[in-house]
Image (tube, helix red, strand yellow):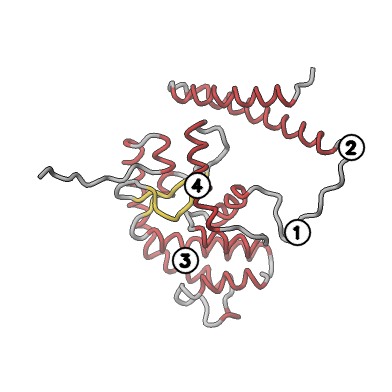
Amino acid sequence: MAETMDELEDLISGLRVQIRRALANGQRAEVPKLRAELHAAEQRWDTGLQEIEGSDTGQAPLAPLPSGASLLPMREQVHQVLTLLGAPAAPKLIVAVHEAFNGGELVSAKLTSLRRDEERSFRSAPFARPYYLCSALAVDQWVSVRGLLAVSTWSLDRRMIGPLSPRVDFLSGAIRLAQHVERTGDPGPQTSRLLWRFATNIPGAAESFGSARPAAIIAAARAELEVHDAADRAQRKAAAEAARRRLDDVQQLFGAQPLRAVRSAD
């Protein structure tokens, strides 16, 4: 007998509760099976929703989307950009990359509240989603680095930020963007402007706007990356190993509480 949408929604909610309880009770061996069941139930729900949307309801057809608009939720659009960059990024950069490669608009001010929404979702149902948009963590106190977004499926050391990390991430991001342009063909005007913004901050990457070629950006970024990469990796790895021993799941994704100075009594 086919499940109703209400039954599927009850099943999905129940499976999320079971996953949360299994994690809380240390029964991690049960989690993969429960997640597979959850994924299958969510797929059946999506199929049911598509059947409802495809049925003749007698309603007027929906207006077409504006040019450049995306059907994807904002969190998925942000996830795509972060996956392309491969490193924690600020909202301003996320918006610029999205506009250059995907068109449409993202509002950087909304990305801050998005991270808070992701934390609330994780706290209510840990690991219920395939990924979360989370924080980058400072290597010294493991607190959330203000203004940076990352992806929960990345390794912890990849989300650590030390003194050299912003430059390393900038260079690695430039390489990945330039490689993406090489794979996809000639860039449009917005993509060319984005490449130029990266090139102007990398010695030897370009002499003028028209000379900001992907191959030149990749070569120049790799040359500088060799100077900083090893030291940055070592610091990130050490901080991540220490954080895994000290932080719980929520803190590893969204940061520890900042240390507060203790005032002595007068």
Regarding mark 1 in the picture, which secondary structure is present there? Answer: loop
| Mark 2 vs mark 3: in front | 2
Query: What is the spatial separation of the Cα atoms under label 4 and label 3, in whole angstroms?
Result: 31 Å
Q: How crowded is mark 2: few (under 14 residues within 10 Å), some or many (20 or more)?
A: few
Query: What is the spatial separation of the Cα atoms under label 1 and label 3, in whole angstroms?
Result: 39 Å
**Residue with the most extreme top position:** 1
| Residue marked by disc 4 | 115
Name the residue nearer the viewer: 225 or 32.
32
Query: What is the spatial separation of the Cα atoms under label 1 and label 4, in whole angstroms?
Result: 27 Å
Whether 59 is drawn above or below 82: the answer is above
Q: Which amino acid does label 3 sit on?
A: Arg
| Residue marked by disc 3 | 222
Task: Look at the image and tell me in which quarter the N terminus lies.
Answer: top right
Query: What is the spatial separation of the Cα atoms under label 4 and label 2, in whole angstroms?
Result: 38 Å
| Mark 1 vs mark 3: in front | 1
Of the two numbered discs 2 and 3 on the same chain, state the one appearing first in sequence: 2
| Residue marked by disc 2 | 56
Of the two numbered discs 2 and 1 on the same chain, state the one appearing first in sequence: 2
Pinpoint residue 185: horizontal percent, then vertical percent: 69, 66
Pinpoint residue 177: horizontal percent, then vertical percent: 57, 63
Name the residue nearer the viewer: 113 or 222.
113
Query: What residue appears at the point 42 percent right and 64 percent down from the top-left corner?
Result: 225
Whether 67 is drawn above or below 17: the answer is below
Q: Which mark is residue 66?
A: 1
